[in-house]
Amino acid sequence: MTKDTSQSEPPVPPVLHCAGRVLSLERPVVMGILNVTPDSFSDGGRYPTVDLALARAEQMAAEGAAIIDIGGESTRPGAAPVSTEEELRRVLPVVERAAARLSAIVCVDTSNPELMRRAEASGAAMINDVRAARRPGALEALADGRMALCLMHMQGDPASMQLEPHYRDALQEVGEFLGARVRACREAGIAAERLCIDPGFGFGKLLRHNLQLLAGLARLAQIGPPLLVGVSRKSLVATLLAQAGAAAGRAPHERLAGSLALASIAVLRGARIVRAHDVAATVDAVRIAGLLAADAAAPRAAAGACADGG
Ligand code: 9MG
């Protein structure tokens, strides 16, 4: 699963090439979530017009999101698929206006090759694909363009993925899957600098699988591409809170502090991009975790940064 480090090369600063722009990941960044769906689990139906969606994108960018992830198909457990026509109708007008107005990277959360092509033409610079470019035509659509791509692991599909997730060794299998998808992208002609990888917390995983992945994030980070992690408001947060003694059944909007705790742990274990609903709070958490992660890697640099602040 890991990179060959026997020939020691100087460390390459992590970057993501996004349709002609270079996003530095030397410090971890936040990807703000914008669901333009009627049925997403936490914020479905909140942005029914292009103007409302754009206002939310602007707010997240102002709060420090480096990437705005716009999705028109709910991928929550049990969600039904959406037609191509409907997905294009929901997403493209928002992408076009967001890309024209914002300096943040505009990303589209889709597995649909037709939307991938149309998104780039509308100004998107990144695709977030929970199916890791496995739909027929997806690799070709991406290879023909210059957008960055997030390859996420999911066992099964959203309609049935939480019914019976099964792994011999979740960390090993997710790592092998992500490595294989990176190779498939490279063979299709997609440059390594355009890729990031994501273990897909909650996508066909029970609590014990999510915890194995969280514990093993540093190993996944060694596969090569920058690591993206999404835990924001997920049921994993509520389950862990209940196990730790909090009241059971925390609703999605009551999971902020727990989400920040997990995001910070992810950054300390190597995540470079954190996908989140609550951008301002996550930016602060990720800044501190990023500073401490840098400190662990090169103690004197961060110690200097903390010199006059206690
Ligand atoms: C769309 N979506 C929902 N959860 C996600 C996660 O954890 N990672 C990525 N890449 N996308 C997600």
Image (cartoon, rainbow, N blue to C red):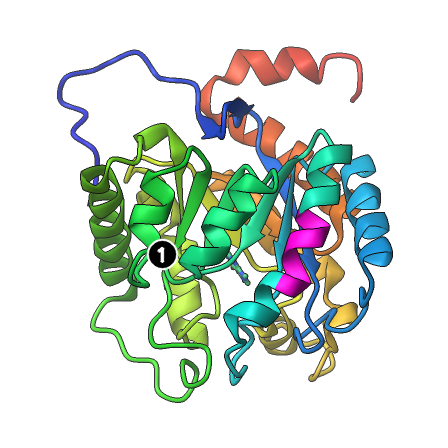
Which residues, given as a range, are shown in magenta?
89-95
Residue annotated with mark 1: 132
Residue positioned 73% across, 42% down in the render: 98
Q: Residue furthest bottom?
A: 163
Q: Position of residue 156 (x, y in %)?
A: 34, 77
Q: Position of residue 196 (x, y in %)?
A: 41, 41
Q: Is residue 81 magenta?
A: no
Q: Is residue 276 left or right of residue 126?
A: right
Assess mark 1: CB under 8 A from ligand 1?
A: no
Residue positioned 61% across, 42% down in the render: 122
Q: Position of residue 177 (x, y in %)?
A: 24, 57
Q: Is residue 77 left or right of residue 302?
A: left
Q: Position of residue 14 (x, y in %)?
A: 44, 25
Can see residue 270? no
Q: Is residue 11 left or right of residue 57?
A: left
For the residue pair 268 and 105, the one nearer the viewer reads as: 105
Q: Quadrant of residue 31?
A: top right
Mark 1 surroundings within 10 Å by alpha-carbon count, few (fewer than 14), some (14 through 19), many (20 or more):
many
